[in-house]
Amino acid sequence: MTLLNSPVSLSRSREWSLGLFFLSCVVILWVLSSFLLNNLFEKGTYSKPFFITWFNTASFTLYLIPYYFKRWNNENHVHNIIETSSLLIEEPDLEDEETQLNKDKLHPLTFDETLKLSFCFTVLWFMSNFFNNASLLFTSVSSQTILSSTSSFFTMLVGYFFNQEIFNLTRLISLIGLFIGVVCVTFNDEPQSADSSPFQIILLGDLLALLGALCYGIYSILLKFKVKDDARIDMKLFFGFVGVFNTLILWPSIVIVHFLGIEPFELPPTKEIWFIILFNCTISFLADFLWARAMLLTSPLTVTVGLCMTIPLALVCDVIFKLQINSPIYFFGAFLVCLSFYWINKNEKNDSDIL
């Protein structure tokens, strides 16, 4: 009982609450982004998910500006830091050994380690976002968010393999409830009019959303497995190099998909489309950073299941903006998804507090 009320436990509880706040922001921003792209693709004015994904990720390079500004500013205090460090070395105490052991366990990632992690992360990140964006060409925002929520299964399986997630009865029941909810909502995925896409096209969109969910499950666990704690990594440096590697390494892919006829290259033809793309880019720039912070402050599975909250939000947006009324099955499924998120989050937060 004393452990649960300790300063460490209270600090961890605050971190968890902050992570959930970031997560709620991500849910709102990602749904907004999905509707912007879906409307853009539906009108056929600029159906370029590959270029949009590359452009959005390239904007992460801007994260390096505050990092290097901070580094330049800190250089003015280098000599003071060195002198202070020398005094600490000359006057060791009994706590030095314990402090050093803790640093050895979870030392901050070096510049080179962050660089390597960004390199490994870039392709998975791009693939997940591209598959999700491309799915909006063929299916609705609701269907895309529903199928993307299956990433919780992939996160749990991959996380269990890397010893990042604990499998217990509560989590099993919650994930079963989540699966039933996803199935219930999927029954609502049917053509809304005679002009709607045929079943084969809708199925392609659903498959792309599932592939995006798989990539998400892999890279979220990879990041948590390599980093382990939010304090170990400079997220601005990490995302900045994701943007650099995306820009330098993946730009030939734009040429390849152009000559293969998969996505002919074309810049946005009007100022209005440029505005939508830049606005969507800003949303992604902020949301993806908050996603990574939320995942490190809580856990991959909590964030993954929490993102299932995009389902009821997408439903509300469909009703308000598209006047699309869904069946009672959808509402029941959305309820199960929300309930599953609550129980998984409660179970995992309790485990974290005890540890």
Image (spheres, rainbow, N blue to C red):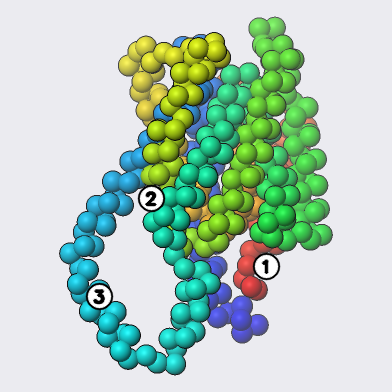
Q: Which three-letter amino acid code belongs to the residue tagged 1?
A: Asp
Q: Is residue 352 above or below residue 340?
A: below
Cα separation, mark 3 vs mark 2, equals 25 Å
Cα separation, mark 1 vs mark 3, equals 40 Å
**Residue 82 - label:** 3
Q: Is residue 254 above or below residue 10?
A: above
Residue 225: name its quadrant.
bottom right
Residue in the image at 58% along x and 79% along y: 5
Residue 348: name its quadrant.
bottom right
User: Which residue occupies the extreme top position in the image?
Assistant: 194
| Mark 1 Cα shell of 10 Å, populated few (<14), some (14-19), many (≥20) | few
Q: Which three-letter amino acid code belongs to the residue tagged 3?
A: Ile
Residue in the image at 40% along x and 44% along y: 241
Sequence-wise first label, 3 or 2: 3
User: Which residue occupies the extreme left position in the image?
Assistant: 76
Disc 1 versus disc 2: nearer the observer: 2
| Mark 3 Cα shell of 10 Å, populated few (<14), some (14-19), many (≥20) | few
Residue toward you, 58 or 5: 58
Q: Is 290 left, or right, of 154 in this rendering?
A: left
Sequence-wise first label, 1 or 2: 2
Cα separation, mark 1 vs mark 2, equals 29 Å
| Mark 2 Cα shell of 10 Å, populated few (<14), some (14-19), many (≥20) | some
Residue 28 visible somewhere in the drawing? no
Q: Position of residue 207 (x, y in %)?
A: 70, 26
**Residue 236 - label:** 2
Q: Which three-letter amino acid code belongs to the residue tagged 2?
A: Lys
